[in-house]
Image (cartoon, rainbow, N blue to C red):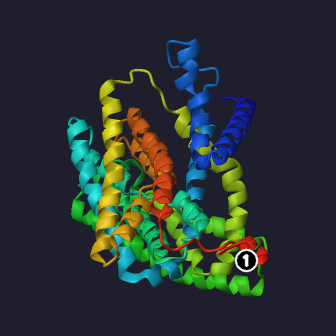
């Protein structure tokens, strides 16, 4: 493909994602849904049905190598900024409660998802690993919508709000670790793991797990050194361009080492690089602002639009629709039961326990990223992309509605806003 053709396609992607992103935001939904829908509209899912009988489209973007490169950079940036925005002090302050809620929010969906995978994918290419992968997708939590709702209701800093936010962070860390193990053990990434193939040519599961855990040990100890280095740079040259540039270099280095040396997904390396830099809070905020300009202006919209572009409804069977509906229902219920039930065991009240469970049901970027990694590794067929898109859509709609209903009859009135405090318009 000629580079000038891609420039035209790039213009179409950016314009359509922005317009539909604005529309979704006005509807109170996450912009990422608009990005995916934009991709569906400009990709073969719509155009091939309207004008062609085959896979051809007016804009054959799904065949572009440039798009794949931009999308990969986009997903790395998304995970890097997620790590930057993680406040480890908040996670630490909630202690055992948040970890217990997060663990339940991983284990129950993982087990239930594996069962669903066994039912609907009996002949999957990677067998039990493909079934477990369905559970891995279910473990992801995105609390962006939940945070906005709790902030609007004045409940973000309450016990429930703090636990939900911290548990979601821990939840994603645990989920990413499980993803790394499943992808490596399944052999889905073996072609890229030169070092792992060298030290473990027979694919011994124990050696693979030990090597994966070695990456996390390496990442932590190396991260301590990098954290001190960046604190020194911040002290000598605060808020200079060298800080975000070096931060991005660290992100790419961690992503490369994670995948090529240790056999762990590159997104895991990018996320941990963000966590390393988040220890220097002021510097992390500055880097996050700078990186977000490129990430959410160009690369991230291309990644999420690419998910929609790669979707196709040709040959869409009733069985796939049943799979998607079952997957979505179980994914939502297991979060409510797992996280809410654990909160009750940790001596939350009944109502607060339900709020905690509902606060954890939303899925977003991480679930989509996990799905794309599984498809790229051949662990699951691309036609099942729709199950995650449906989950993101339904949970994004359901989470704010249920939270507002649960807080509607709350005895404690919402905290007054800054404007209300200044004008005195509150009881």
**In terms of depth relative to the viewer, which is nearer, 127 or 415?**
415
Residue at figure coordinates x 34%, y 59% from the top left:
336
Relative to 124, does residue 159 appear above or below in the rendering?
A: below
Percent position (x, y) of residue 82? 56, 64
**In terms of depth relative to the viewer, which is nearer, 27 or 6?**
27
Q: Residue furthest front?
A: 427
Disc 1 designates what residue? 421
Where, quadrant-wise, is the C terminus in this rendering?
bottom right
**Left or right, 65 with reference to 194:** right
Q: Is residue 201 visible?
A: no
**Left or right, 223 with reference to 22:** left
Percent position (x, y) of residue 55? 51, 20
**Left or right, 119 with reference to 109:** left
Relative to 254, does residue 233 appear above or below in the rendering?
A: below
Percent position (x, y) of residue 235? 73, 87
**In terms of depth relative to the viewer, which is nearer, 143 or 126?**
143
Residue at figure coordinates x 68%, y 79% from the top left:
282
Relative to 254, does residue 50 appear above or below in the rendering?
A: above
């Amino acid at each position: 493909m000629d580079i000038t053709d891609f420039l035209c396609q790039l213009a179409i992607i950016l314009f359509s994602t922005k317009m539909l992103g604005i529309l979704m935001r006005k509807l109170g939904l996450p912009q990422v849904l608009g990005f995916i829908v934009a991709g569906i509209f400009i990709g073969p899912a719509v155009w091939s049905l309207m004008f062609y009988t085959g896979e051809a489209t007016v804009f054959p973007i799904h065949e572009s190598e440039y798009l794949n490169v931009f999308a990969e950079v986009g997903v790395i940036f998304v995970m890097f900024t997620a790590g930057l925005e993680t406040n480890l002090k908040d996670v630490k302050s909630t202690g055992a409660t948040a970890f217990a809620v997060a663990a339940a929010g991983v284990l129950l969906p993982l087990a239930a998802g594996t069962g669903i995978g066994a039912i609907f994918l009996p002949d999957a290419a990677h067998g039990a690993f493909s079934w477990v992968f369905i559970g891995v997708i279910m473990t992801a939590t995105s609390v962006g919508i939940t945070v906005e709702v709790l902030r609007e209701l004045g409940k973000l800093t309450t016990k429930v709000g703090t636990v939900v936010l911290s548990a979601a962070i821990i939840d994603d860390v645990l989920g990413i670790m499980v993803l790394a193990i499943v992808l490596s053990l399944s052999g889905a990434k073996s072609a890229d793991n030169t070092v792992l193939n060298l030290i473990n040519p027979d694919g011994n599961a124990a050696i693979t797990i030990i090597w994966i855990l070695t990456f996390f040990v390496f990442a932590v100890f190396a991260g301590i050194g990098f954290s001190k280095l960046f604190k020194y740079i911040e002290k000598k040259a605060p808020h200079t361009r060298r800080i975000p540039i070096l931060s991005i270099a660290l992100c790419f280095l961690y992503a490369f080492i994670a995948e090529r040396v240790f056999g762990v997904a590159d997104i895991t390396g990018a996320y941990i690089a963000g966590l390393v830099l988040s220890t220097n809070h002021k510097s992390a905020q500055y880097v996050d602002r700078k990186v977000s300009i490129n990430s959410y202006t160009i690369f991230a919209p291309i990644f999420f639009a690419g998910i929609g572009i790669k979707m196709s409804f040709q040959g869409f069977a009733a069985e796939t629709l049943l799979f998607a509906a079952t997957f979505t229902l179980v994914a939502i219920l297991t979060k409510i039961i797992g996280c809410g039930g654990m909160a009750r065991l940790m001596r939350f009240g009944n109502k607060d326990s339900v709020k905690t469970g509902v606060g954890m049901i939303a899925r977003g970027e991480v679930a989509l990223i996990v799905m794309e990694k599984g498809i790229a590794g051949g662990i699951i067929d691309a036609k099942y992309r729709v199950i995650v898109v449906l989950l993101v859509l339904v949970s994004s709609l359901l989470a704010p509605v249920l939270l507002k209903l649960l807080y509607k009859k709350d005895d404690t009135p919402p905290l007054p806003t800054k404007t209300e405090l200044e004008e005195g318009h509150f009881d």
